[in-house]
Each structure stands twice: as C-alpha cells, then as structure tokens.
Amino acid sequence: MVDNRYATALVIGSVLSLLACVYLSVAIGTQHWYQYHSQPASNDANNGSDLQHMRQYFEDEEVDELNYSIALFRLNGTLGLWWRCILVPQNLYLLKEPDPTVVTKCQAFTLPQQWESKYKFPGNVNSGEDLIRTYLWKCQFLLPLVSVGLVFLAALIGVFACLCRSLTPTLFVGLLHLLAGLCSLATVCCFLVGVHLLHERSELPEGMDYSLGWSLFLALVSSPLQIMAAALFIWAARSHRQNYTRMTAYRVA
C-alpha cells in the first residue's frame, strides 16, 4: 500500500511532467524562438523586384544559410527549430502605400538542411566548415526529440509500475525526467549560442533589432518542470523504499 504522501508526490510529478511535455512539444512545432525587427520593407529594398527575389530565395528548399538569413534580418523574420518565417507585403508593387498589407510566409527546414554543414562565413563554401555551429545546429534539432522520447519512456515505465503495484521503477522514471530536463535546457543553450555565432559572422542591416520569442520561453519553462517532476519521483521512490526496509526489519525483529 502506498502512503498518501507518496501518492500525492506521484500525482503532482505526473502533472508537472505532462505540462512540461506539452510546453516542449508546442515550442518545437512553432517558429517564435527568435524574432527580428527591421525597418519597413520599402526602406530596405529598392523596389518590389528585390523583395520578390528575396522571397523566392527564402521559399526555395535548396536555399543556403546566407540567403534565408538575409530575408530574416530584413523582413521581420522569426526563427524556430523547424521553421522560419518572414513578413512580406501582400502586393509587392504597392510599397508606396502608407500601411501596405503584409502576410506571413513560412518555410520548414528540410531534413537535409538540418544536417548540412555550417561555414565560417554563411553561404561561403570556400571559407571552411564551422564545426561549432554545425554541431550546435544538429544538437538543437536532436535534443528536444530526445527529451520528449525520454518522457514517453518514463510514462511507459510508470504504467508498468502501477500495474505491478511497486514504487521501485519510479526511481528510473525520475532519472529519465532528470535527463529530459537537462536535454531541454541544453536545447535552449545550443540555439542561443548558435544564433549568437551567426550574428557575429553575418553583416546585420542597420536599424535591425532582435528579441527572444515566446516559443523559446516555453522550452525554457519545460526544463525546470521536468526537473521538479524528477525530484518528486526520486523522493517518493527512495523514501518509500527506506520505510519499507524499516518496516520489514521491525517485523523480523
């Protein structure tokens, strides 16, 4: 029989785990990790033809890092783990209007783009591969998937623990949640360092500003939630085991 304290800890830990998994899943699937704020498109491009070329390059699946980065910098782009988006006027040839209607154009990163090499100067193959940025990009793609996978594995072990009416497997559930929380935190760190290095190696347009997006904060919040869930699971498993050992020793005595 499980003590009420341990049962409460398990319930709270399960709720925290569920919230963390939902937050991380939403963060992975959205593109608001990093937001760029640039001048109006009419000030950045000479005419609608330049914007049209920029948009075509951005939406091309074979586009290199240099071309889609320029579009992100100059067209109020948003960047995520799997998506990139820009704001473009609905009618590219009516830029002289006071408030032209803008629409959002998004493009998903293909799997080859997630695994392609990054160069010391973006878009310049002859500059040599930048190993740090390459591995940071790959890690920010893989680590959140690993984190979600660990949470689902922990949930599966928790179901078997309930069926067996034992709290011993809960210790492994807590350890898996701890690893998942560290992976979530590492994802945010890899993303921020990678973006910072990209800015250092790129020519940023004048008047451009940037800020962190709400998707990144969701991923950042999921990490402590997973760690708190891990602490509750580990505490419940260890405390229940110690009490069970003492009770067994008392009965033998």
Image: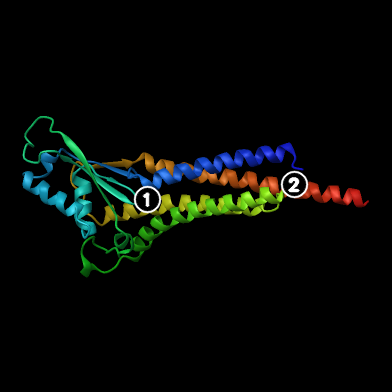
- Mark 1 Cα within 10 Å, few/some/many (few <14, many 20+)? some
Residue at the (51%, 40%) spot, across then down: 19
Q: In the image, is 124 to the left or to the right of 217?
A: left
Viewer-nearest of discs 2 and 1: 2
Q: Quadrant of the N terminus?
A: top right
Which residue is more in the foreground, 117 or 130?
Answer: 117
Check disc 1 and report the residue beneath it. 192
Judge from the rendering whether residue 227 lies leftward or rightward of residue 214; answer left or right: right
Measured Cα–Cα span from mark 2 to mark 1? 41 Å
Q: Amino acid at mark 1?
A: Leu
Mark 2 — residue?
A: 240
The amino acid type of the residue labelled 2 equals His
Residue extending farthest front: 163
Of 54 and 189, nearer the camera is: 54
- Identify the residue at horizontal 55%, vertical 44% (top origin): 17
Circle 2 SS class? helix
Q: Is residue 74 left or right of residue 235?
A: left
Please, is residue 171 above or below residue 47 in the view? below
Instruction: Classify mark 1: helix, strand or loop.
Output: helix
